[in-house]
Image (cartoon, rainbow, N blue to C red):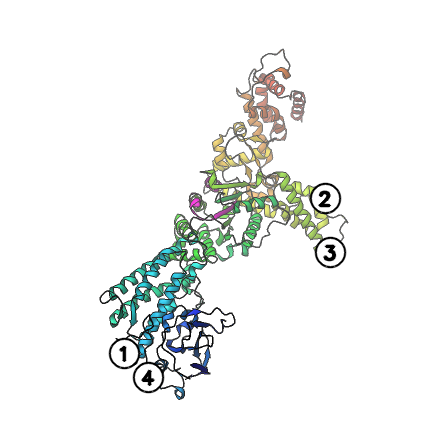
C-alpha cells in the first residue's frame, strides 16, 4: 500500500500485478476541484511517476508528479495524483487528463516504479534521505493483464517510462479531441484515424519529453467547437482553420503508418529517426492548435494580449473621435421622433429588409440627433457594428477613413471578424489606403462573409452626415460600391445626409429593393410640429429652472413659457429642429424678453439667433456658386432662379416655373443640383412644386447683413418676374378662345374649358403683384402698354375661365394708381 506523508513517499507493502482501467469518480464527496479522484477496477494498487517540465500544470519549472493507488475495503481502489511544486504537494488538473488515458497505469511492481523515481535527474526530486531502494520494473504489460515474456521487465530503463507516458498522454488528449468534435465530422474522422494508428504502437523506446509538451498544446482544442450549436453555425473562417488541422492529422497518420508497416502489425517504434519524424509532424499540429486557440481566445492558460494582432490592426489608422461615444451633440429628446425611431428599429430587426437605410433631410432637420438616438439603441442591444460621424473641416471629412474606422470598431467586438480581417491585412497590409472599391472588398465584403457566412445581418454600420465629406467624387465611389455589394455583405448600413446631388445619384439609382429612403422633409408637418413643440416646452422649462437657481431675483410670469408663445415659435421653426434649438439658445440670455420678441416678432432676432443657420446656408451656397466649378453665366442663372423662387407669389411646379422664366427644366435642375439641401425640387418629374424648405433661407438671402456676397434683392426678383409675365402674355400662349369655350351663350358653370397652361394662368393673375413690387415701374408699364390693349379680352377670358374675372377691374385701378404715383 502506498501512502503520502507530506513530501515523503513510503511503501507499506507490495502491490499485486494488475492492469488498471481508470474511470471518473462518481462520488460527489470525493470528486472536488481541490482533490480529483479516480477509481480503479477491483483491488488494483500501485504507483507510477511522471517527471519532466510540468506542462500539464502549466508551470515553467520542473515538478515531480506521482500517481498513487491504494486498496479500499469496498474493493474499489482510489487513484490520486499529486504534484510537488515549490516544496509543497498539491492536487493538479493532470488527473483530468490521466483519467482519459488508462494505459498510463498498467502496474506490475511497485518497487520497480520506485526505483525509477530514484533514477530521475531533477533539482526538485524527493529528499535523498527518503529515497527507497528497489529493483526496476516494467511500467506496462499486455492488454490481457499478462506480462510480456519477450521483454526484460527487470531492466526496463526509466527513459522508457517517460517516453511511454508522453506517448499515451498524447493519445488520450487526441481521443478527447475526437470525442468533442461531433460538430465537425471531418475533424473527428481524422482524429480517430490517428488514434487508431497510435494504438498499433506498443511502446516508444526513447526518453523524449516532447510528446507531453505536444499533448499540452493540443489539449482543449475541442473547446473551439463547444460554442456552436450545429455545424451550420461554424463560420467559414473557423472551418478553414479546421480543414488545415484535418490535413495535418492526415499527414501524421501517414507518417506513423509508414513507420509501423515495416514490421509486424503491432510493434514498438524504436529507431531514433522514427521517433523524431513522428514528433516533428506532431509538433506542427501542436503549434497550429496552440495558435488557433489563441486567435479564438480559447486558450485559458494564455491570457497575454495578442500584441501582433494589435500592431496589424493599427495599420488601419482608424479615426478615434468618429464614433458615437465621442459625440457631444444631443440625441432626440425623450418623447420626440418616437414613430421614426420605431421604424428604424423595425428595419434593423427585419432580416428581409433592404441592407441600406438612407435618411435624407435638409440642413437643420435633426438628422444627427436621430442618428445619435439610433446608435444608442443599437449599442444597448449589441447590434452596433461601428459608427462614423462625418464633420467638415476635420479629419472626419475624409471619406477614405470611414471604412477602416468601421472595420476597426467591429474587429474589437467580434473575434470571428477580427480573425478574417487579420488574414486580409497580412496579405494586404496597406488595405486602409487602397482605392475605395478595394476597401469595400477587402475590409468589408470578404472578411464579413468569412466571419458570418450567409447568415442574415444582425449588425448595423452607421454613417452620419455624408454630405460633410470633402471629396464628392470619392463619396460617390464609396456609395456606388456599397449599394452594389450590400446584398452580398452580411451587415446593414444606416446613412444620413443632405440631399446633395452626388449622394442622391447613387442612393436613388438602381433597384429600390436595395435601399430604403426616408425624407425627413416629407414627414407629416403635424408630427414634426408636435415633436418641436414638445422640445421647446421642455427646453424653456429647463431654462426657467436653471435661471431660478443661478439668479433667484429674475422674475418669471407664473405661466412662463405660455402655450401661445411656444406655438408661435413652433410655427416659425417649421420642420427645422435646428431653428428650435437655436431659438432656445437665443432665449437663454433674457428668457422673458427674448421669448416675447420671438413670439411677437417685435424685433428681428439678429445674429445671436441666426448664426447657426447662417453658417449652414453660407456653406451650401459657397459650394453651389464656387467660381472654380461654375462660370459667371451659370452663377447668374442660379441667382435668377433663386430670386424667382423667393419672389414668386404662389409655388409653381418645376415645368411651369421653367416656362415662366424661359429656362429649360433640364437647365433648371442642373443649376440647382447643389441646392437640394435648401430647395425642394421634385425628384422624379417636373410636376412637383419648387420652393424653399423653410422661410429662414429666404430671410437669409434677402438680408444683406447676414448673407453678404450672396445677397438677393426681392425688388430685382419681382422686376424679372414682371417681365416674364409680360413676355408670356405677349406670346401666342395668350390668344383668342384660349380656354376652348364651345359657345358664348352658356355660363361658365356649363362649359367644359380646355386646360390652360399653369405659367399662363400665373402670368395673367400675378403680373400686377410683381409690377407693383418691382423697381423701375415706368419702364415695365411701357412694355405692358404695348401688349395689353390688343390682348385685353384674351386676358379677361383667362381670368373668367379660372373664376377670377372680378379681379380685373381692381387690378387695372391699382396699376393706374401706381402709374400716376
Image coordinates for residue 275, horizontal then vertical, percent: 27, 70
**Residue 485: within the magenta?**
yes
**Residue 471 visible to an observer of this rendering:** yes
**Residue 740: within the magenta?**
no
Name the one closer to the observer, 75 or 450: 75
Distance of mark 1 from mark 2, alpha carbons? 106 Å
Q: Earlier in the sequence, mark 4 or mark 1?
A: 4
Which mark's residue is nearer the viewer, 3 or 1?
Answer: 1
Name the one closer to the observer, 523 or 296: 296
Q: Earlier in the sequence, mark 1 or mark 2?
A: 1
Assign a secondary structure to mark 3: helix
- Residue marked by disc 3: 548
Image coordinates for residue 300, horizontal then vertical, percent: 45, 66
User: Which residues fall within the magenta stretch?
Assistant: 481-506
Q: Is 114 drawn above or below residue 370 in the view shown?
A: below
Assign a secondary structure to mark 2: helix
Image coordinates for residue 799, horizontal then vertical, percent: 62, 21
Q: Which residue sits at x=25%, y=72%? A: 272
Instruction: Tell me whether circle 1 and circle 2 mark residues in contact (CB < 8 Å).
Output: no
Amino acid at each position: 500500500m502506498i501512502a503520502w506523508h507530506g513530501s515523503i513517499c513510503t511503501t507499506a507493502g507490495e502491490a499485486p500485478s494488475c492492469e488498471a482501467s481508470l474511470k471518473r469518480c462518481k462520488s460527489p464527496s470525493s470528486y472536488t476541484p481541490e482533490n480529483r479522484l479516480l477509481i480503479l477496477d477491483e483491488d488494483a494498487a500501485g504507483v507510477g511517476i511522471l517527471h519532466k517540465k510540468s506542462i500539464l500544470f502549466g508551470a515553467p519549472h520542473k515538478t515531480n508528479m506521482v500517481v498513487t493507488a491504494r486498496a479500499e475495503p469496498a474493493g474499489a481502489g482510489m487513484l490520486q495524483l499529486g504534484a510537488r511544486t515549490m516544496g509543497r504537494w498539491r492536487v493538479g488538473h493532470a488527473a483530468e487528463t490521466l483519467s482519459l488515458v488508462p494505459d498510463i497505469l498498467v502496474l506490475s511492481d511497485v518497487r520497480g516504479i520506485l526505483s525509477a523515481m530514484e533514477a530521475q535527474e531533477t533539482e526538485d526530486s524527493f529528499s535523498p534521505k527518503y529515497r527507497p531502494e528497489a529493483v526496476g520494473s516494467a511500467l506496462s504489460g499486455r492488454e490481457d493483464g499478462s506480462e510480456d515474456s519477450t521483454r526484460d521487465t527487470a531492466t526496463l530503463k526509466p527513459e522508457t517510462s517517460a517516453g511511454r507516458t508522453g506517448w499515451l498522454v498524447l493519445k488520450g488528449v487526441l481521443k478527447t479531441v475526437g470525442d468533442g468534435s461531433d460538430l465537425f465530422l471531418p475533424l473527428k474522422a481524422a482524429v480517430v484515424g490517428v488514434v487508431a494508428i497510435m494504438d498499433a504502437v506498443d511502446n516508444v523506446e526513447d526518453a523524449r519529453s516532447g510528446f507531453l509538451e505536444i499533448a499540452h498544446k493540443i489539449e482543449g482544442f475541442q473547446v473551439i467547437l463547444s460554442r456552436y450549436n450545429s455545424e451550420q453555425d461554424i463560420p467559414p473562417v473557423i472551418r478553414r482553420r479546421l480543414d488545415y488541422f484535418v490535413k495535418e492529422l492526415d499527414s501524421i497518420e501517414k507518417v506513423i503508418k509508414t513507420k509501423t508497416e515495416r514490421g509486424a502489425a503491432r510493434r514498438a517504434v524504436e529507431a531514433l529517426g522514427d521517433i523524431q519524424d513522428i514528433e516533428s509532424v506532431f509538433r506542427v499540429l501542436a503549434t497550429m492548435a496552440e495558435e488557433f486557440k489563441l486567435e479564438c481566445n480559447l486558450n485559458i492558460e494564455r491570457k497575454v494580449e495578442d500584441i501582433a494582432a494589435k500592431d496589424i490592426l493599427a495599420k488601419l489608422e482608424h479615426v478615434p473621435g468618429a464614433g458615437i461615444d465621442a459625440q457631444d451633440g444631443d440625441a432626440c429628446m425623450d418623447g420626440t421622433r418616437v414613430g421614426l425611431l420605431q421604424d428604424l428599429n423595425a428595419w434593423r430587426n427585419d432580416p428581409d429588409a433592404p441592407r441600406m437605410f438612407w435618411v435624407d433631410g435638409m440642413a437643420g432637420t435633426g438628422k444627427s440627433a436621430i442618428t445619435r438616438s439610433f446608435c444608442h439603441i443599437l449599442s444597448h442591444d449589441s447590434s452596433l457594428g461601428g459608427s462614423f460621424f462625418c464633420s467638415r473641416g476635420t479629419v472626419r471629412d475624409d471619406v477614405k477613413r470611414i471604412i477602416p474606422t468601421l472595420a476597426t470598431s467591429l474587429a474589437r467586438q467580434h473575434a470571428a471578424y477580427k480573425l478574417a480581417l487579420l488574414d486580409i491585412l497580412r496579405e494586404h497590409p496597406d488595405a486602409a489606403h487602397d482605392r475605395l472599391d478595394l476597401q469595400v472588398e477587402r475590409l468589408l465584403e470578404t472578411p464579413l462573409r468569412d466571419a458570418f457566412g450567409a447568415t442574415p445581418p444582425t449588425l448595423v454600420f452607421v454613417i452620419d452626415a455624408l454630405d460633410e465629406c470633402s471629396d464628392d467624387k470619392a463619396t460617390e465611389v464609396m456609395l456606388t460600391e456599397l449599394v452594389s455589394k450590400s446584398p452580398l455583405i452580411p451587415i446593414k448600413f444606416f446613412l444620413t445626409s443632405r440631399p446633395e446631388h452626388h449622394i442622391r445619384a447613387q442612393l436613388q439609382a438602381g433597384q429600390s429593393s436595395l435601399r430604403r429612403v426616408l425624407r425627413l422633409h416629407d414627414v407629416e408637418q403635424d408630427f414634426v410640429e408636435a415633436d418641436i413643440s414638445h422640445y421647446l416646452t421642455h427646453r424653456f422649462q429647463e431654462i426657467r429652472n436653471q435661471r431660478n437657481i443661478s439668479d433667484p431675483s429674475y422674475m418669471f410670469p407664473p405661466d412662463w413659457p405660455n402655450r401661445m408663445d411656444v406655438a408661435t415659435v413652433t410655427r416659425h421653426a417649421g420642420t427645422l429642429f435646428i431653428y428650435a434649438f437655436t431659438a432656445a439658445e437665443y432665449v437663454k440670455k433674457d428668457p422673458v424678453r427674448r421669448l416675447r420678441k420671438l413670439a411677437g416678432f417685435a424685433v428681428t432676432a439678429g445674429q445671436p439667433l441666426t448664426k447657426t443657420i447662417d453658417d449652414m446656408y453660407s456653406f451650401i451656397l459657397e459650394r453651389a456658386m464656387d467660381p472654380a466649378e461654375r462660370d459667371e453665366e451659370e452663377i447668374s442663372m442660379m441667382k435668377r432662379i433663386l430670386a424667382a423662387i423667393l419672389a414668386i407669389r404662389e409655388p409653381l411646379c418645376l415645368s411651369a416655373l421653367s416656362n415662366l422664366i424661359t429656362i429649360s427644366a433640364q437647365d433648371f435642375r442642373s443649376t440647382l443640383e447643389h441646392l437640394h439641401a435648401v430647395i425642394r425640387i421634385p425628384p422624379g418629374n417636373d410636376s412637383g412644386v419648387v420652393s424653399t424648405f423653410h422661410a429662414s433661407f429666404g430671410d437669409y438671402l434677402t438680408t444683406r447683413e447676414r448673407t453678404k456676397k450672396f445677397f438677393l434683392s426681392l425688388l430685382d426678383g419681382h422686376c424679372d418676374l414682371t417681365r416674364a409675365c409680360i413676355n408670356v402674355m405677349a406670346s401666342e400662349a395668350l390668344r383668342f378662345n384660349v380656354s376652348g369655350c364651345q359657345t358664348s351663350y352658356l355660363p361658365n358653370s356649363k362649359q367644359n374649358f380646355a386646360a390652360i397652361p399653369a405659367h399662363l394662368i400665373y402670368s395673367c393673375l400675378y403680373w400686377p403683384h410683381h409690377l407693383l413690387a418691382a423697381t423701375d415701374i415706368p419702364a415695365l408699364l411701357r412694355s405692358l402698354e404695348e401688349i395689353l390693349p390688343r390682348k385685353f379680352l384674351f386676358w379677361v377670358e383667362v381670368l373668367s375661365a379660372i373664376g377670377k374675372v372680378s379681379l380685373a377691374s381692381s387690378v387695372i385701378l391699382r396699376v393706374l394708381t401706381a402709374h400716376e404715383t
